[in-house]
Amino acid sequence: MSPILQVDHLTMRFGGLTAIGDLSFAAPARQVTSIIGPNGAGKTTLFNCITGFYKPTEGSVRLQHPVAGEIRLESLASHRVARDAQVVRTFQNIRLFPKMTVLENLIVAQHNPLQAASVFSLAGLLGLPSYRRAETAALEKALNWLERLGLLALADTPAGELPYGTQRRIEIARALCVNPVLLCLDEPAAGLNPRESAELNQLLLQLSREEGVSVLLIEHDMSVVMKVSDHIVVLNYGCKIAEGQPLEIQNNPQVIKAYLGEDDSEEVAA
Amino acid sequence: MTAVIQTSHAPTRSERLKDAGGVAFVALVLGIPMIGLTTVDAGGMLEVRTRWAALGLFILLAFLGRLLFSALGDQLRARQRTKARLGSAPASGSRPVLLKALGWGLLGLSLALPIFWGDNRYVIDTATTVLIYIMLGWGLNVVVGLAGLLDLGYVAFYAVGAYSYALLSTQFGWGFWEALPVAGGAAAAFGLLLGWPTLRLRGDYLAIVTLGFGEIIRIILVNWTDLSGGPNGISSIPRPTFFGLPFKPPSDDGPATFAGFFGLEYVPEQRVVFLYCLILALALLTNLFVSRMRKLPIGRAWEAMREDEIACKALGMNVTNVKLSAFALGAMLGGFAGVFFAARQGFISPESFVFSESAIILAIVVLGGMGSQLGVVLASLVLVLIPEVGRDFAEYRMLIFGAAMILIMVWKPGGLLSHREPTLKAPSSFIRQSKREAA
């Protein structure tokens, strides 16, 4: 399996603090790769480095784009990571546009194709058919994702008024509207109830198996991680301590140590 | 200070008394130098007199006022709570319709104004001033209301537009209509000039830089005497013409005039009404333009950027372009208003473009409800008409002005109209279908 994302010797330092130290791993294409680790292990920092919000101190992040070929993500500005490399992320502390409706949130995600179709807003101001077609297409795509995530009835509700779990799903739907090649989800199951969490599992499997979207997942909820992951990378203090398939990771003594401390290891293994 | 502490439970009587006592103490501290002591002219010498009775009355008023205010506040909160419990669904359903009716009503009124009050110069002049502020408010609404960029120097673009027209017309003999797009373009260029260095700034920091920018433009206008005439300003700026026909008393040998061409008797009100119609047309065009832009990708991008800039970046939006376009377009609209201002006054000087103008325009946007087009109209009416109506109160009118602003912000913290209309809605067929499936 060829990797979609290749991270090599990635290091991120903030002054004297090394948040990520010499991290290398590969995420296979069309699969779900999970990044796990205790709090403060550097998972979100890794996401920020991949998606252009931080410039890594050292190392490289390379994406194998199906059309454009290899793209060096570490040198791109954050909006170009999403626009040119189609690497799209969600945030640990949900970042929707709260006063805008759910549908508007999903239309904003299609800003670039729509803005191109509106030709410096001129075609849009005049209401030319080329712009109208683009707008209809954007609307259809948004409604399609809303339907698949069971959010259609909420389309015209301001996003900020909805419950936490629903907002999480909206953020994923919004990211999907950018046509991601690689979808980076930062704790998507946080705050979801067991039913919603099961639905999320199904969605992630569908996306990776059927839609060809590779997924990079940060998650604490092991019921999600173990069920959907094809590949797991475990971080602790910014370094990789283990990598492999779910079953290997579950039984890896170093991982258990990192999560639970040394003395309790026998209990967990049982 | 006890007066500012908010308690979640209903305050008891002793708490209320304590709170009011705190306010009375503040009144005492402020009142001693301001009311308690006064100077009188006693035969060429200043003598300090005391006015303890007046001070006592002031403190008592503050104490009782605070008690009354806290009791009223409780009642208001209780009513809001019951309203929230009853659910606001029916109210929010009928509100957009009501607002639409209000908007059309105001438009009808503005069209009827020259027909019914065309001979009343005072009414038309005041209405013209209101419309200038409405247009400025709509322009600033793009920057502050939609894009969420706090701009305290908006008057600079108004000045750039006004001086562009003044210079083009007096130095190069340009007419109003040729100068209008050029002056708008100049203002937009200044908008970019301000936008570029402030791209990384947000909130308070941006406000300070824009404040400085507004002052820089004004100070340049005061000091660059060769270009702007310095503090004397530029006078005898030509008035706009009706397709080349000026509004002047007809003369036998002079060029054709409006009154002469249409065979009307010349009255000076013709020009005033024409100016009113001109600013009405400009303002309506501005409104049409801004509300159309709001429904285009760029308009939605402005609003999204106001809501969350980081999320915009994560979705691949070039925030730099979005910001600069908001600055440039807002500045352009301010420039248009400036051109009209110069043409209407016939004389401009830096005096007209001081910071307090920026503050009033910003107050219009904030008081109206950020991003609301109709709110700007209502706020302009309130803020321009209150000082007009209050002329009889002489020096107290600014006090009334301030009190009105405070009261609006207390009653309606989100502005007069905080309702936000979505830029697009899901086709109803989709929603109904999904609701049926869910049921």
Image: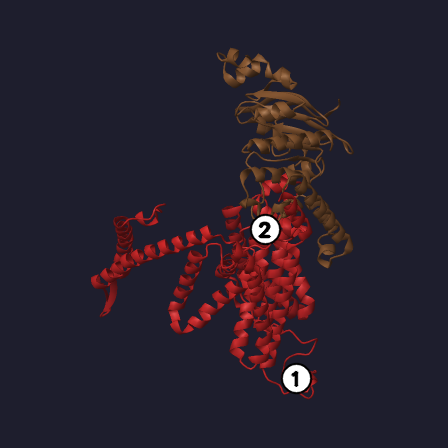
Chain colours: A brown, B red
Residue B148 appears at what percent x and percent y?
Answer: 56, 50
Residue A232 appears at what percent x and percent y?
Answer: 64, 21
Image quadrant in which the C terminus of chain B is located: top right
- Residue B172 to residue B154: above or below: below
Q: Mark 1 points at which residue?
A: B259
Mark count: 2
The subunit letter for the residue under badge 2 reads B
Choose top left, top right, bottom left or bottom right for residue B398: bottom left
Judge whether residue B229 can be spotted in this image: no
Q: Mark 2 points at which residue?
A: B147
Amino acid at circle 2? Ala
Residue A30 appears at what percent x and percent y?
Answer: 72, 28
- Residue B130 to residue B150: above or below: below
Secondary structure beneath dot 1 equals: helix
Instruction: Rate crowding at label 2 as few (under 14), some (14 to 19) or many (20 or more) other CA atoms within 10 Å.
Output: many
Secondary structure beneath dot 2 equals: loop
Choose top left, top right, bottom left or bottom right for residue A144: top right
Per the rendering, the mark at residue A74 is: none
Judge whether residue B41 can be spotted in this image: yes
Q: Nearer the viewer, residue B428 or A268?
A: B428
Q: Residue at x 73, y 50 (%)?
A: A136
Q: Residue at x 41, y 60 (%)?
A: B407
Q: Distance between the residues labelled 1 and 2?
A: 46 Å
Amino acid at circle 1? Ala
Q: Which of marks 1 and 2 is in front?
A: 2
Q: Residue at x 31, y 56 (%)?
A: B66
Q: Which of B299 and B122 is in front in this view?
A: B299
